[in-house]
């Protein structure tokens, strides 16, 4: 993957930045401070890497306003308010070059049911299947091998990666990104014991994905038993996440990789669940809650909570407990010592 | 997704039910007590929601026999033995309307090896590949993008979702449901260290799925190193589950989402493993065992065990331990207090 | 799946072996000691199964040099240095029979961009899509439904299973095996809070897979935010593993099923992470480290470490802690007893 842009192109993006240094060449890569080579652009976001700026081979550096070192010869520093966000602007420039929007139209290898509706401004890549009554909105792009079930619907300006399945009757809002292998609308895991067997409870609900949602590779979201499983606007879901039937997630929440939600659990807005954490069924996790990695949420959690552990406890309490827990073998000794001392203090009655 | 059925259609399903109330309209949705709107059918299964029945907007309610409130005007209550199961019957009715069985036949976009055998009553949807010697049984339905390897076999009346892979020589029984992205027959994870490298051990066994098994989205079941990995009849496997090579699972067990089994582990019948739990290799988990969420099974487990924790312990012992563990910081203080008191009790010898 | 080979074919593979016994028939299966039937080949690798050798129905057995029992009539024992590795040789023989390399060429149902390059010795099976500028090297085999993005590249002698996605600009080295549903090059999970919303940080880097890497079913590896996510030569990754953006993994490491790495974490060479373990972001895990199952790695880990727990601790310390932890309820009692004794020893001052 190769790209190149001029210093002036970058300068134009960095409104209000302050430049110092004499580098005038092109930019041919983006890299971390440590790995950058001449020609690269790099950035200082985390203050703990401050001492690496001077040693970096990068030719162009985005640094915070209060960074007071001067660049060596052949380098240029741009002082900006938030180097992390300004880097995102530069990356967007690269993105617009390397990921060009394809021509609208339907690849002849794709199979489109005659009752489906694909907007003329949308692109359907090779080897897709669009089922009866399904809809693809304006300017959306199905890359390849996408399968849309009966009456499934994709909104406007969506990007749908290869091997995505949007099951029958499930709907996706506008400006969503679904990564490779995402499954929307698999059956919920619902059975009723009947003698020694498990009788399947039909799962006739749907999945509703609101606007501006991103869903990571191979994530799986079950359709509701009835009614709907719903992912709120602006929520971001990482790879390999499991969402059970009838879950409801609010707006702008973030679920990191391999998180799992059992059925009928509800998350508020702005919830953050870190990797490999999970929640039991029929729980409510309040707005702004923070769930540490690998946490097992076992009861409903009030808004703003910070929790960790399996079963979960309050984050500070967990950390205090861990400190003591690591001293357990020492405790055992101390108790034994005490017992001996106490024993020796007893009046010798035998 | 819209549907509508008459009160008489529902009444006909609810054999032996007792009705009271005056609602006579159609049913246009199914919802929980809290979310129902007029025209919806709802149900009371969990007694803790009893007080919500009277407030529910639902027009039609399935309630248990011992529910003694009378419906308000414009509503109807059906008293039944098990509202959860009766709801399943109503959902089945909806299902039969919304998910119609497709016409038999092979979509012309699919690629069928000339040595494969597809029963004339089966349906092969668009863009599937059926390899040499593979077989598809009576009335089975491959939705789209399914790949069957060499000599792979699907039984009768199966439903195989898009992007499923049944690898070479692997077999699936009758009435199985495989959800989107399921992989059967990936290689087991077997290597032998050889100097600084890992030498691959060939994986030449197969996967055998018995009858009436359901497998969730993106679940992955490895072929055996030799012989077979086997999933017993009536077992239900949820999304994103990992089954290692040479595992054997008995009948009517249930593995919730993101469960993982290492190689050669065996489960009995009626085992229940909750979400994100895992088991090490070469273990035996007995009939009817219950494994709590996120448990790490580290040794074989006798039939009927209930376990939790990593490494696992007996469930009651785990709960007792957790109660005490949360008091650890307090313990630390108590020990220190005791030490001080004991110190003060010592004869002042110095 | 059926196969058959002669005793002489096996004997030829087992160079330097010592045979005793009178079995002369063919070999028609491979099975464990316990499950073998007459005609099967079996092996003794784990000494704890030593007593099963005599009882096994297997006709042909691979045993270690120091195994001193004599075979019963109708059986043959081959004494070898490492029965596990010798079995692998036999399995390779079976593999070469059952998994024949397909004819080179491109299936007519596949869609190949005119600017892509497929080596004439490669095989592209049915229903694949190979994007603009993508390359497939010598003797590589894409089974079916594979999607290669823009400028994506597959090296020589690779085996790429159905439903694999190699995203735009991502590269795969020589002799790699990618199992069903693998996603390379999904976007990293990077957002910057902006008011109540999450603003997406563009992810413009790539994934680089070096030579001799194997990746399990439905594993997902994110592209870098910039620069690259890299998997070192000879590393083996199991099913459903998550690798975040900008991770770097060294050579010959092994990540078991459902392992998860957050962004920018680096693993050295020869690291072993067992199932369902995970690591936070921006950590360094040194060469040869061992991470037990379900461990949550919360800080960087020096080379050669053995760790367990969430948050992780040294393995021996963890085990010591667990021993004491299980005695916690007893401790509580002992402290209470001590308190009572101490109380009784106090001078009665009130």
Image (cartoon, coloured by chain):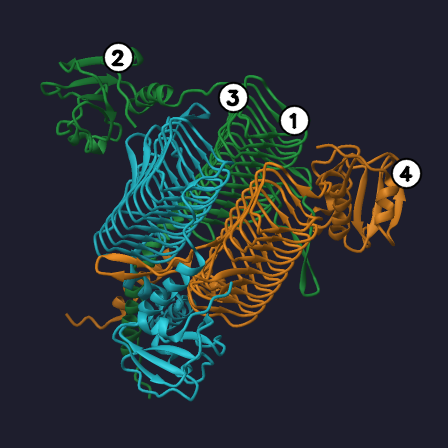
Chain colours: A green, B orange, C cyan
Residue tagged by mark 1?
A116
Marks 1 and 3, how far apart at CA: 18 Å
Report the mark closest to the observer, 4 or 1: 1
Label 4 residue SS: loop
Other-residue count near label 3 (Cα within 10 Å), few / some / many at <14 / 14–19 / ≥20: many
Other-residue count near label 2 (Cα within 10 Å), few / some / many at <14 / 14–19 / ≥20: some
Q: Name the N-terminal-most of marks 2 and 1.
A: 2
Confirm whether circles 3 and 4 share one chain: no
Residue tagged by mark 2?
A11
Residue tagged by mark 3?
A157
Confirm whether circles 2 and 1 share one chain: yes
Confirm whether circles 2 and 3 share one chain: yes
Above or below residue C61? Residue B228 is above
Other-residue count near label 1 (Cα within 10 Å), few / some / many at <14 / 14–19 / ≥20: some
Chain letter of disc 1 in the image: A
Residue B180 position within the rendered picture, expressed as x and y whole percent measured from the top left: 56, 44
């Amino acid at each position: 993957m190769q790209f190149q842009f001029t210093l002036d192109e970058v300068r134009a993006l960095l409104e209000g930045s302050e430049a110092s240094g004499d580098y005038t060449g092109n930019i041919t890569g983006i890299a971390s401070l440590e790995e950058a080579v001449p020609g690269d652009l790099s950035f200082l976001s985390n203050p703990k890497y401050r001492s690496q700026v001077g040693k970096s081979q990068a030719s162009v550096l985005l640094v915070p306003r209060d960074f007071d070192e001067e660049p060596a010869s052949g380098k240029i520093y741009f002082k900006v308010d938030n180097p992390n966000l300004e880097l995102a602007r530069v990356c967007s420039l690269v993105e617009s070059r390397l990921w060009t929007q394809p021509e609208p139209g339907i690849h002849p290898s794709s199979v489109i049911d005659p009752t489906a509706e694909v907007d003329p401004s949308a692109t359907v890549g090779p080897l897709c299947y669009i089922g009866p009554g399904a809809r693809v909105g304006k300017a959306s792009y199905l890359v390849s091998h996408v399968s849309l079930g009966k009456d499934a619907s994709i909104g406007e300006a969506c990007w749908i990666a290869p091997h995505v399945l949007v099951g029958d009757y499930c709907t996706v809002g506008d400006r969503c990104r679904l990564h490779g292998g995402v499954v929307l609308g698999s059956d919920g895991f619902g059975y009723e014991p009947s003698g020694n067997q498990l009788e399947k409870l039909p799962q006739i609900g749907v999945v509703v994905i609101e606007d501006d949602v991103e869903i990571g590779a191979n994530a799986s979201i079950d359709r509701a038993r009835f009614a709907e499983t719903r992912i709120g606007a602006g929520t971001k879901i990482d790879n390999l996440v499991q969402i059970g039937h009838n879950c409801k997630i609010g707006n702008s929440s973030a679920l990191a990789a391999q998180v799992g939600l059992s059925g009928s659990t509800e998350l508020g807005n702005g919830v953050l669940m870190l990797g490999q954490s999970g929640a039991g069924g029929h729980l409510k996790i309040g707005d702004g809650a923070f769930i540490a990695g690998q946490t097992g949420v076992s009861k409903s959690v009030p808004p703003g909570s910070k929790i960790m552990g399996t079963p979960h406890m309050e984050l500070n309490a967990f950390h205090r407990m861990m400190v003591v827990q690591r001293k357990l073998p020492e405790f055992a000794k101390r108790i034994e010592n005490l017992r001996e001392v106490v024993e020796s203090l007893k009046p010798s009655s035998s």
